[in-house]
Image (cartoon, grey):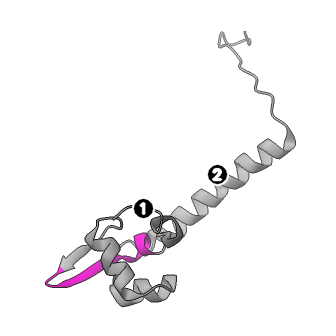
């Protein structure tokens, strides 16, 4: 025990593991902070399709299947830009509709 009565736990990691952990944590923090400024902006199907270079029908299909979060304004889908920037259409292609 250390002098203050608390147990000390020591982890042994190599430099590569430490670098990976720090990089992953910093990347997550930067991305979260960067995206949050767009939390209050809504965008259309066409904007999401353009951002991700996919067909607008693909965006609609995934929204209908609730694979990506969307709200409806009448007949139109709207997406929170902070969320839309993080969609991964490569992963979505592997999901069952």
The residue under label 1 is 95
- Find the magenta span and give its range: 73-84
Name the image quarter holding the N terminus.
Answer: top right
**Residue 69 is covered by the magenta coloring:** no
Residue 70, relative to residue 23: is it above or below? Answer: below
Numbered disc 1: secondary structure: loop
Q: Residue at x 78, y 43 (%)?
A: 18
Provide residue 57's location: percent of width, then percent of height: 34, 85
Whether 5 is drawn above or below 95: the answer is above
| Res 41 seen here | no
Few, some or many C-alpha atoms within 10 Å of disc 2 (few <14, some 14-19, many ≥20)? few
Which quadrant is home to the C terminus?
bottom left
Circle 1 residues within 10 Å: few <14, some 14–19, many ≥20:
few
Extreme residue in the left direction = 74
Picture coordinates of residue 96, whole percent (x, y): 38, 61
Relative to 90, 46 lies left or right: left
Q: Is residue 71 left or right of residue 10?
A: left
Q: How many marks?
A: 2
Residue labelled with disc 2: 25
Q: Which percent across, then down, holds residue 23?
A: 72, 55
Taking the image as shown, residue 23 lies to the left or right of residue 33, namely right
* 29 or 79, nearer to the observer: 79
Q: Note whether residue 33 is visible.
A: yes
Give the side of residue 21 with respect to residue 91, left or right.
right
Q: Is residue 82 magenta?
A: yes
Q: Residue at x 23, y 73 (%)?
A: 71
């Amino acid at each position: 025990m250390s002098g203050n009565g608390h147990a000390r736990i020591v982890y042994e990691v190599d430099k590569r593991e430490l670098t990976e952990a720090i990089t992953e944590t910093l990347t997550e923090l930067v991305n979260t902070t960067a995206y949050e400024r767009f939390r209050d902006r809504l965008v259309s199907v066409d904007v999401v399709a353009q951002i991700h270079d996919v067909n607008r029908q693909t965006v609609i299909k995934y929204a209908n299947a609730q694979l990506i979060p969307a709200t409806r304004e009448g007949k139109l889908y709207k997406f929170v830009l902070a969320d839309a920037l993080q969609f991964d259409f490569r992963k979505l292609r592997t999901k069952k509709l």
